[in-house]
Image (spheres, rainbow, N blue to C red):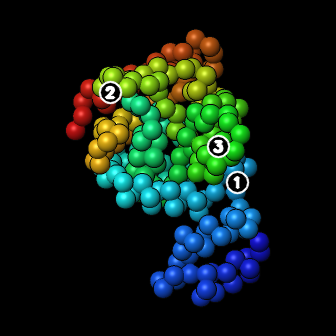
Amino acid sequence: MSAEDAAARIAAKPEHGEAGAPTIFDAVRRRLNGEFDVDPWGFDHELADMAVAATALRWSVDVLGGARIPQEGPALLVVNRRIGISEPAVVNQGIRRVTGRTARVVGMPDIPIASSWLRRVGAVMSDPAEIAGLLRAGELVMVPLGWQPLHGSIAGELRSAAVQPAIEAGTPVLPVATFGSELGRSWRIMIGEPVLPPKRASKTGAVEFAEAVRAGVQTLLDNPR
């Protein structure tokens, strides 16, 4: 779609609500007609915007340390999770509030059709090459720790392969702690100080770096504010 066509679409009254903003019905119709754009990873910005707006109706999110998330450029965010259903959406709601950005969530299952739709709202595979490509493109990437459904105050496992792309790119990694429950409404997110990757990549260095990042998340969980 050209810039002129896009401007005409925005200006057309039948395409918009009373306030001049596109309605959800317009967005759905465009997707049914194939009139929308996605990035190289299948991300649909407008659909992600609607998803974040929907999560704001479900959850109330308080963010501490949000200024540590870069307004532009790459960063890897490592997040604890309990069951792991709410945390990606809750954290992205907080990120959007303080930066206007969306983090790509690592860990999408490789299921036909379902994975295509999950990519639309920012999910990506647990593939170091895909993580590396996103960081090179200047994106925020969210890596969940291992599940801890019965021990929410314990940071789960972090595989060294998940942080290897950040080491190779020299990208800072931010530990992130979440406080809330699947059935609750109120969540708190704490963003810790960046953990800088080692200057020289090695297998041992990646393991030690992953442990340092996991420990950063654990420190936040141990000292809630």
- Front disc: 1 or 3: 3
Give coordinates of residue 218: x percent, y percent: 34, 24
Q: CA distance from mark 2 to mark 3?
A: 28 Å
Q: Residue at 45% of width from left, 46% of height from top?
A: 89
Name the residue that disc number 2 marks: 152
Name the residue that disc number 3 marks: 114
- Front disc: 2 or 1: 2
Helix or strand or loop: what does disc 2 sit on? loop
Residue occupying the far right of the picture: 2
Q: Residues within 10 Å of mark 3 (few under 14, many from 20)?
A: few
Name the residue that disc number 1 marks: 39
Amino acid type of the residue tagged 1 in the rendering: Asp
Is there a contact, CB below 8 Å, between mark 2 and mark 3? Answer: no
Q: Quadrant of the N terminus?
A: bottom right
Q: Quadrant of the C terminus?
A: top left
Q: CA distance from mark 2 to mark 1?
A: 35 Å
Judge left or right: residue 225 versus residue 220: left
Judge left or right: residue 45 versus residue 41: left
Amino acid type of the residue tagged 3 in the rendering: Ala
Count of number-bearing discs = 3
Give coordinates of residue 113: x percent, y percent: 69, 44
Amino acid type of the residue tagged 2 in the rendering: Gly
